[in-house]
Every structure is written in C-alpha cells, then in structure tokens.
Amino acid sequence: MDQNKNIIFIAALKDETPNLKNFHYSGVGKINATIKVLELIKNYKPNKIVNYGTAGSTSKKLSGLIKCTSFVQRDMDARGLMNFKLGETPFDKISTISFKGAGYICGTGDSFAQSSIEIDCHVVDMEAYAIAKVCKLQGIDFECYKYISDYVNENSNQDWQKNCSKGANLFRQKFPEVN
C-alpha cells in the first residue's frame, strides 16, 4: 500500500498480478471479496480502493485494459418475487452502483460465465460489484480496471487460463506504485 495516497490495491488471485507489488487478494466470488474489503478497511482505513482483475467481455469489440464505473449483479434474480428486475436485490435501495467518470458496466456473479448474459453489461467478473458496494456504503473512493481475458462463450475457461496474467503490465503502466 502506498502510505502517502492511502490506496489499497485488490485483486481476486495472484495469478492475475504476476510481478506486481502492493496487492491484497480476496479470493474468488462476492462473499470472499466483501469479507476481504471489510477487513482491509478496518485495518488500513484507505481513502481509495482500486480493484484490478480479469473479465470476460460480452462483445468482441472490447479488448485490453478497460475502466469500469458501473456495477450490477448479473446473478441476482428475484423476478418471481413481486416483479423485481433482473439484478435488483429485493428490498435493497442499491441495485446498480455507479462511480464518477466514463467507463463500462461490469456484471458480477458467482458463476463463471460461458454463455449469453441476460443483464445489460459490457464485461463479467466475480468480485467487482461486492467491492464497489462496500466502498459506496463506506464512503470510500473506488476505481476498477479489468483486463479482457476472454469473451463469454463455451471456450471462456480455456481462454481465461491462457490470458489471466497478460494484463498486469498494462495495469502497471497506469499505476506505477505496483511496480
């Protein structure tokens, strides 16, 4: 962590950040990400949390390192209960989380996406919504960068394995403090 800026860097897996320093790791999924972010906030009291990781794109038009500024839960499906929308948490005032600036929509879910996504999003991951929600509720600035490791299809798992470490150098260019 860079003490001067009080920024925490978090990724799900070490495999996504080869040769990068100053990272904390949450493990995979929304629950693991939530637990880790709450622990980091308690221990470090950061002003900003930056999430970096891999994501599957829902379109072949996206590639490289992108910034996400809006977050939805692609697997929250309570449509059968009182006409809630896909992605809407019942009786929760927060469904879509947005942060300032232009960016892409990240659809987070506790499944590895290998087929079409019903909810409107540009990329899919398994942690960003949880981190974004904790930051929003705790009043902590949040930035999220995703490297497109795969496209959502039947080959996503092989493509992710082959490409999960390839975005680290692009992230390093944006944040030299992880060098």
Image: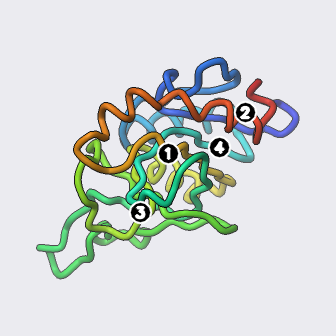
Give the quadrant of residue 5: top right
Question: Which residue is tagged 2?
Answer: 172
The numbered mark, 3 or 4, whose residue comes first in the sequence reads: 4
Dot in front, 1 or 2: 1
Question: Which residue is tagged 1?
Answer: 148
The numbered mark, 4 or 2, whose residue comes first in the sequence reads: 4
Neighbours of disc 3 within 10 Å: few (<14), some (14-19), many (20+): many
Q: What is the spatial separation of the Cα atoms under label 1 and label 2, in whole angstroms?
A: 16 Å
- Can you say whether 133 is above or below 165 in the image? below
* Amino acid type indicated by mark 1: Ile
Please report the residue visible at 39 percent of the width from the left and 34 percent of the height from the top.
160
| Label 3: which secondary element | strand
Q: Position of residue 29 (x, y in %)?
A: 36, 39
Q: In screen coordinates, is 124 left or right of 175?
A: left
- Can you say whether 102 is above or below 33 in the image? below
- Can you say whether 59 is above or below 150 in the image? below
Q: In screen coordinates, is 89 left or right of 172?
A: left
Query: How is the structure coloured here?
Result: rainbow
| Extreme-bottom residue of the structure | 83
Dot in front, 3 or 2: 2
The numbered mark, 1 or 3, whose residue comes first in the sequence reads: 3
Q: Position of residue 18 (x, y in %)?
A: 59, 20
Question: Which residue is tagged 4?
Answer: 50
Q: Are marks 4 and 2 in contact (CB under 8 Å)?
A: no
Q: Are marks 1 and 3 in contact (CB under 8 Å)?
A: no
| Label 2: which secondary element | helix
